[in-house]
Image: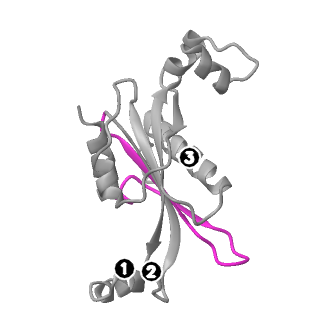
Amino acid sequence: MAPSITVTELPSPKAILLETIAAEIEEFASQAGWDRPPSLYALVPTRVLAADPSAASILSPGQELVASEIDEDAITPIAQEELPEEPLDEVLAQIGWPPEVVGCALSQEIVMVPPSAESELQQLSPAEAVDHPERREARLVVAVLRDGRSAAMLRLRGSEGTDDDLLTGPDLAPNLVAALRETLAD
């Protein structure tokens, strides 16, 4: 009898690209440390930026960028101005992007509690939920493209002396994915 072979479907290169962009944004956000406000990013084709001399000089200081030599799928995240201190859903509902923006991403710190504590949360105020003894703080990065693809990355904040854990997957924050997709609607 021949051994059975399990075929694993690998993610498409474009899916990997979006996860790479989310990872790049998370790394950028982590450089500023924890306890930061949410940050929004426009995702723009790198070729579009290379065609603009002022943007090209920022992308590649001291080197000339040739748009035709840049991978057609390459995307560059561009940090936007700081978001207003209003409820995030209301802020996102007011955002629209020009056609040259192919997607957007958001980095946001969140508080998570285990499923066993969720029933308690319905009876707690938001302030009480944030102070829950089983809470975990995390940084969530969600990236979406106009074509509907999304990627999400969650970095759990480690306690003193421990490393942060990193989780990835497109279904980590479906509500945020939907809200970001709405900002891209025509």
Q: Is residue 44 magenta?
A: no
Give the secondary structure at mark 3: helix
Residue bearing the label numbered 2: 130
Q: How far across and how far down the image is residue 134, in percent?
A: 48, 86
Residue at x 23% of width, y 31% of height: 186
In the image, the segment drawn in magenta is: 147-174
Q: Nearer the viewer, residue 148 or 140?
A: 140
- Is residue 7 among the parts visible in the rendering? no
Q: Nearer the viewer, mark 3 or mark 1?
A: 1
Residue 78's tag is: none
Assess disc 1: are there few (<14), some (14-19) or many (≥20) residues with their C-alpha within 10 Å of its C-alpha: few
Residue 126's tag is: 1
Mark earlier in primary sequence (3, 2) = 3
Residue at x 33% of width, y 83% of height: 118
Residue bearing the label numbered 3: 25
Answer left or right for 113 relative to 32: left
Q: How many numbered marks appear?
A: 3
